[in-house]
Image: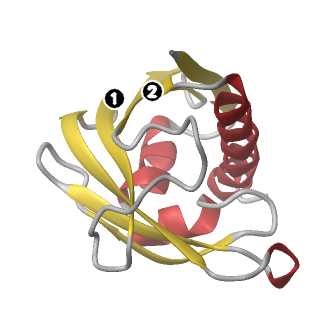
């Protein structure tokens, strides 16, 4: 098994970075790498809650929406949360992952550390079965976090 682990520091307080995860507006601002967009986000960030999100590919990548559900299993507001990531249709019904090596039920952890007006965020995605799937996910996550950084710092 392979995991993706990424740590990122943001020049923004923890509350602002938490908002990027916990509100539809926040998620729509950063979900999707590079030119991909997020046309739909519903979120209920609490234990037993979930998010339904769509990532839209630009025309040069074939267009179309890729849907996912994040089922939140453990939440400590402003400090950390865990969730299970599943690819779905627009109604939240599970669909197969888009490539071999991506887990059908991927366990993810996100931890926030207050650095006195700045935030360190560590994210771990567990359970990839191929290095190719792990590397593709890491690349996509890094690009999403670039967008998150711009969102939370106003840049």
Asked if disc 2 and disc 1 are in contact, CB closer than 8 Å, the reply is: yes
Position above or below: 66 against 98: below
Task: Report helix, strand or loop for mark 1.
Answer: strand
Residue at 72 percent across and 69 percent down: it is 36
- Residue 125 visible here: no
Toward the viewer: 113 or 21? Answer: 21
Left or right of 71? Residue 41 is right
* Residue name at image x 71 percent, y 59 percent: 154
Residue farthest toward the left in the current orientation of the protein: 48
Residue at which label 1 appears: 80
Task: Report the quarter where the C terminus lies.
Answer: bottom right
**Colouring method of the image:** secondary structure
The number of numbered badges drawn on the structure is 2
| Residue 41 position (above or below residue 133) | below
Residues packed near mark 1 inside 10 Å, few (<14), some (14 to 19) or many (20 plus): some
What secondary structure is marked by label 2? Answer: strand
Tell me how far mark 2 sits from mark 1, CA to CA.
6 Å
Note whether residue 113 is visible: yes
Give percent across and percent down for residue 83.
Answer: 30, 39
Q: Position of residue 141 (x, y in %)?
A: 66, 42
Identity of the residue drawn at 59% across and 24% down: 4
Residue under pointer 2: 112
Name the residue nearer the viewer: 7 or 134: 134
Quarter-of-image position of residue 69: bottom left
């Amino acid at each position: 098994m392979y995991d993706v682990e990424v740590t990122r520091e943001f020049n923004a307080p923890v509350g602002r970075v938490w908002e990027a995860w916990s509100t539809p507006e926040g998620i729509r601002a950063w979900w999707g790498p590079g030119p991909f967009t997020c046309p739909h986000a519903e979120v209920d960030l609490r234990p037993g809650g979930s998010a339904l999100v769509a990532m839209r590919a630009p025309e040069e990548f074939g267009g179309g929406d890729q849907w996912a559900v994040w089922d939140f299993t453990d939440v400590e507001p402003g400090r950390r949360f865990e969730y299970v990531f599943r690819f779905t249709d627009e109604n939240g019904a599970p669909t197969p992952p888009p490539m071999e090596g991506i887990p059908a039920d991927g366990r993810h952890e996100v931890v926030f550390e207050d650095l006195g007006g700045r935030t360190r965020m560590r994210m771990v995605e567990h359970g990839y079965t191929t290095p190719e799937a792990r590397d593709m996910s890491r690349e996509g996550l890094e690009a999403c976090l670039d967008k998150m950084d711009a969102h939370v710092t106003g840049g």
